[in-house]
Amino acid sequence: MKNKKLIISFLMAFALIFTACSKNDSKVTEPGENKKSEEKIEKEDDSKNKDDQADNKGLVNEAVDKEIGVPYEVGVTPDDYNMDYDTSRLHSLKDKKSKYYPKDGVKGLYFNTYSINNPEVYDKIMDMLENTRLNSIVVDIKDDWGNVTMDFETDDPDIEYASIDIINPKDFIKEMHDKGIYVIGRVTTFKDSIITEKHPDWGFTLDDGTLWKNGHGEAFMNPFLRDVQDYDIKIAKLAAEAGFDEIQFDYVRFAEGFETFGDTLDYSRGEFEDKNMEEGDKRVAAITGFVQRAREELQDDGVPISIDVFGYALQVERADGIGQDFGEMSNQTDVISSMIYPSHWGFNSFDIEKPDLEPYELVKRYLEAEQEYLSKLDHPPLSRPWIQDFTASWIGEGNWMEYDKDEVEAQIQAIYDSGQEEFLIWNASSEYTQGVEY
């Protein structure tokens, strides 16, 4: 009898456990459970939609493989509640600024890397930086032809192939930092005539298999390719590790006019090859995706990124021929440097008949429009425009004037009058006007 009671007790306990498990697994037993299930399904659908959107934009993480067991620190990561948040946004520009970031904002010059070893040019640049409000320089890490100008002591065969080792980056940066100078490294991103010699498949080819080049004999790499993006990001990461305060990406685009001749070229669309998207949208997704990847990768090193864009990108907003969407790119970078040289605008831009003749008005009106546009973005970048210290005599008689002290100062004053403090000045040969009040 005693054994019978034990057996009955055991069976009852088992029944209770089974009932509890069934209750927990049931979709219909508890009031409100249907609603919870619907919410869960909606969240799963939202998560899937976000993943699809990321795929459509070509947003992928990690250009350089991490060691096994090393966790990803950036990118879109699900938390315990299956809600997505972008951890790469945890660090703002303020968080990534080095101790050399100027307190009154970056006021810089392009310093042609080939001039660094020229004592006469070097001394002039240093004198300007030490005796004016100028406090920063932009130097080429990878120049307009694709030469890697720094000795990064890497065994990467592609970077070694492109290296000409003009300067030792660590020694140069230490010298600049000792002078209190903020150092920005410029990467000419997708215009590259050097590495495409080694990897023609990284570029665009003609019917006869030869590499396509523009009218100046310059080749472009194919931004759709993961290997191409990785190459530029590897160079940028080496520069960050060497001590550069910021990495600036220039030529973050397809070649000018690509929409008019791209269909005559042979090239891969990479992950977008079979996607049901317009060709222009594919190009925009590839370029925007690269900017996000670069920002995320450089965040590992605590280094901000900046990108150069044509000034007219703001006006057209979406130049899908070259793959640039001003808003999408701006949302993904820490700093936007629009090239707003007065000489580079067409007649009647911003209601100015001949923009090169009115540098103050051109810069002022551009910044007014840019400020309004950037204020509407989710993640507006810092605006640090490029202005000119060169004379554009090639734009036609009566359309240009000599740019000297007054013209350079007019552009700078327009920046200050617009409530901004930062700017960069371009002269390709680093021959700048003397006596300018910055």
Image: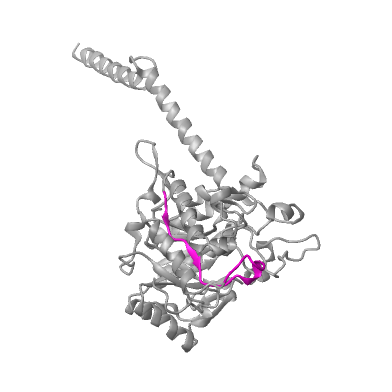
Which residue is nearer to you in this view: 41 or 265? 265
Which residue is nearer to you in this view: 27 or 286? 286
Magenta highlight: main SS:
loop
- Coordinates of residue 413 in the picture (x, y in percent): 41, 63
**Residue at (51% x, 79% y) in the render:** 431
Q: Quadrant of the C terminus?
A: bottom left
**Residue at (59% x, 62% y) in the render:** 344
Looking at the picture, does residue 99 appear above or below residue 265? below
**Residue at (45% x, 72% y) in the render:** 109
- Coordinates of residue 345 in the picture (x, y in percent): 59, 59
Which residue is nearer to you in this view: 46 or 339? 339
Q: Is residue 432 left or right of residue 255?
A: left
What residue range appears in magenta? 380-401
Which residue is nearer to you in this view: 163 or 333? 333
Q: Residue furthest bottom?
A: 119
Q: Is residue 218 left or right of residue 371?
A: right
Q: Residue furthest top?
A: 1
- Coordinates of residue 414 in the picture (x, y in percent): 43, 60
Q: Quadrant of the N terminus?
A: top left
Looking at the picture, does residue 271 appear above or below residue 27? below
Residue 29 on the magenta segment: no
Residue 384 on the magenta segment: yes
